[in-house]
Image (spheres, rainbow, N blue to C red):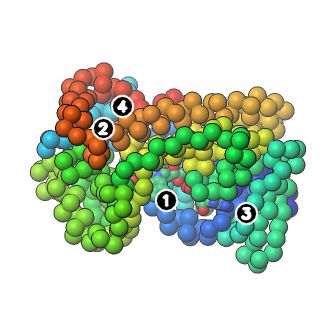
Amino acid sequence: MRTQVAIIGAGPSGLLLGQLLHQAGIANVIVERQSGAYVLGRIRAGILEQVTVDLMAEAGVGARVQREGIAHHSIELVFQGTRHSIDVHGLTGGKQVTAYGQTELTHDLMEARAAAGLETVYEAADVAVQGFDGERPQVRFKGKDGREQVLQCDFIAGCDGFHGVCRASVPRRALREYEKVYPFGWLGVLADVPPVSPHAIVYGNSERGFSLCSMRSMTRSRYYVQTAMDDKVEAWSDQRFWDELRRRLDPELADRVVTGPSIEKSIAPLRSFVAEPMRFGRLFLAGDAAHIVPPTGAKGLNLAASDVKYLSSALIEHYREHSDAGLDQYSARALARVWKAERFSWWLTSLMHRFPDTGDFGQRLQDAELGYLVGSRAAATALAENYVGLPL
Ligand code: FAS
Ligand code: PHB
């Protein structure tokens, strides 16, 4: 087998990259270790920056998000039993975020890829990336039939997420990793009930911990509560979850929560992580393969999109203009935006969660910062411009 760009991973990064390269006439094959159904079954992000929505349109898969995505012009903060609105749209000169599930984005990309007849190897086993420090990189894997296959290529895009094989294949001496693990997790629930706040994500900081009210559509809601790191999803009945969520909201909002049976319930750990650089010879990392943010700032999926924008542009420049300037600048350019999003995600996580070592002084600092945030245009503007996404 041979192609121009071998893409490892059929999550949002890999699928979006494959679509943009295809549109530029660059051959690519995606090698994915799970089944397509498994990839689609993962419940993850829900908020898209305009950069991501624009990139979907550029990739030719923007029709449904335009039709079904729900524009959010504000966010709400609940603390000390009171809810405050932050006018994100007004503070950023008219920018917005769009509520549209990662599952839907992945579906749209999968559908476009299949319609274009592009090759995606699902359920690939023992995937190995080799030769990327030379001129002839290749990907080895076993197909569903158990037969070993070799995919020769010009470049490898490591879009295989935090637990993937690509970053793990880079010699340790060539990699610098930065990590912060948070002392709590998020218990997330998906339920087919109308969202309590259909036009603004609600972030809560109560003495019982963080909470978040989000959505996937006008009939499907997504909620989270902060849990202990060692908490188990089995310990959470639906009723216990709904009761706990309500306790963390202001009374008016709590009364409006519509409950129902969970269709997905899971606990995710929270970490900040960056691997530098994001390029190793002919191997380029994009998305969660290179960085992780705590989901508080809704940046993970959106950072994957900006990485893919930079990488696809650089690869197109290589093939069209025989210039490697973009490829040489890729890592520094992507990391500049990654670190700004890492900072924002860490800051909002630190502000909205209860830490074991917060203490009385730390609690007063959180209260003071929240009060400043909702009382100062300058402070709210800084939040708003990061929330809608900094420029590419
Ligand atoms: P992904 O992890 O989505 O995709 C990587 C793909 O590579 C997977 O399909 C995997 O099966 C495949 N792969 C792995 N190893 C492989 C190998 N050896 N060979 C071949 N394929 C391999 N972000 C937000 O913005 N908001 C959220 O609310 C949010 N919630 C999240 C909840 C959870 C539980 C997790 C884990 C992440 C969440 N994220 C959230 C972040 C998430 O949306 C990611 O940013 C996004 O999935 C990144 O996409 P990819 O880079 O494509 O990585
Ligand atoms: C979600 O809808 O899953 C979501 C929304 C906003 C966040 C994190 C997650 O900050």
Residue underneath mark 1: 103
Q: Which mark is residue 351?
A: 2
- Mark 1: which amino acid? Thr
Helix, strand or loop at mark 2: helix
Q: Nearer the viewer, mark 2 or mark 4?
A: 2
As measured in the structure, the alpha-carbon distance from the residue carrying label 2 to the one carrying label 3 is 40 Å
How busy is the neighbourhood of tag 4: few (under 14 within 10 Å), some, or many (20 plus)?
many
Rendering coords of residue 282 (x, y %): 79, 43
Which amino acid type is marked by label 2? Answer: Leu
Query: Is 53 on the left or on the right of 189, as rendered?
Result: right
Which of the two discs, 2 and 3, labels the residue nearer the N terminus?
3
* Label number found at residue 384: 4
Residue 4, given in percent of the width and then of the height, sits at 82, 49
Disc 1, SS: helix
Disc 3 designates what residue?
127
Q: Earlier in the sequence, mark 1 or mark 4?
A: 1
Q: Earlier in the sequence, mark 3 or mark 4?
A: 3
